[in-house]
Amino acid sequence: MVPRPQGNDQKRTRLLATVDSVPPGRVASYGQIALEAGLPGRARLVGALLRGLPAGSPLAWHRIVNAQGKSSLDPRSSAGRTQRRRLRSEGVEFDSKGRIDLKRHGWRP
DNA sequence: GGATTGACGGGAG
DNA sequence: ACTCCCGCCAATC
């Protein structure tokens, strides 16, 4: 087996570091995180990564939403409510449809 | 080990 | 605004 040019944990680490670089009060999309981590077009990888986070992870996963400015979690789920609660506590506003105005709260690297 | 799934995204109609 | 479709590819079945 020829080792991959880039170890997958290397990618994972870069992605996690990028997620962690999103400041409080701002949100970033999955695609944006992938792009900044040097993996353009790999938004789904970010989703898969966050999905596998252990409960109680110190990582600020709640600042990641989809490109539409909406949470990709079931709003009724525990994680979904946690995300909303955390974002609101950071000053992020949601409109009546649960959408965030990215012009205002979007992360601009 | 092929097929399906999915915390995505962009494009087309 | 909404639906459908396709590319992406790790994880899961």
Image (cartoon, coloured by chain):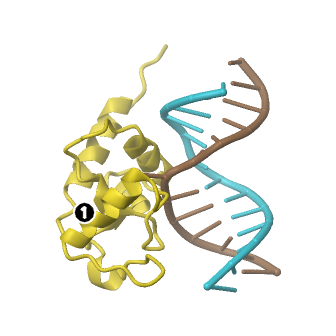
Chain colours: A yellow, B brown, C cyan
Residue A64 is situated, as x and y percent measured from the top left of the image, at 35, 60
Residue B12 is situated, as x and y percent measured from the top left of the image, at 75, 77
Figure check: A42 above or below A52:
below
Residue A5 is situated, as x and y percent measured from the top left of the image, at 39, 30
**Foreground pick, A50 / A44:** A50
C7 lies left or right of A33: right
Count the marks: 1
A89 lies left or right of A102: left
Displayed quadrant of residue A8: top left
Quadrant that contains the C terminus of chain A: bottom left
Residue drawn at (27%, 45%) of the image: A16
**Foreground pick, A4 / A49:** A49
Residue drawn at (43%, 60%) of the image: A31
Q: Is residue A26 visible?
A: no
Figure check: A72 above or below B10:
above
Displayed quadrant of residue A66: bottom left
Residue at the extreme top of the image, as rendered: A1
Residue drawn at (30%, 53%) of the image: A61
**Foreground pick, A3 / C13:** C13
Q: Is residue A99 visible?
A: yes
Label 1 belongs to which residue? A86
Badge 1 amino acid: Arg
Query: Label 1: how many residues lie within 10 Å, few (<14), some (14-19) or many (20+)?
Result: some
Q: Chain of mark 1?
A: A
**What secondary structure is marked by label 1?**
helix
A61 lies left or right of A80: left
Figure check: A50 above or below A94:
above
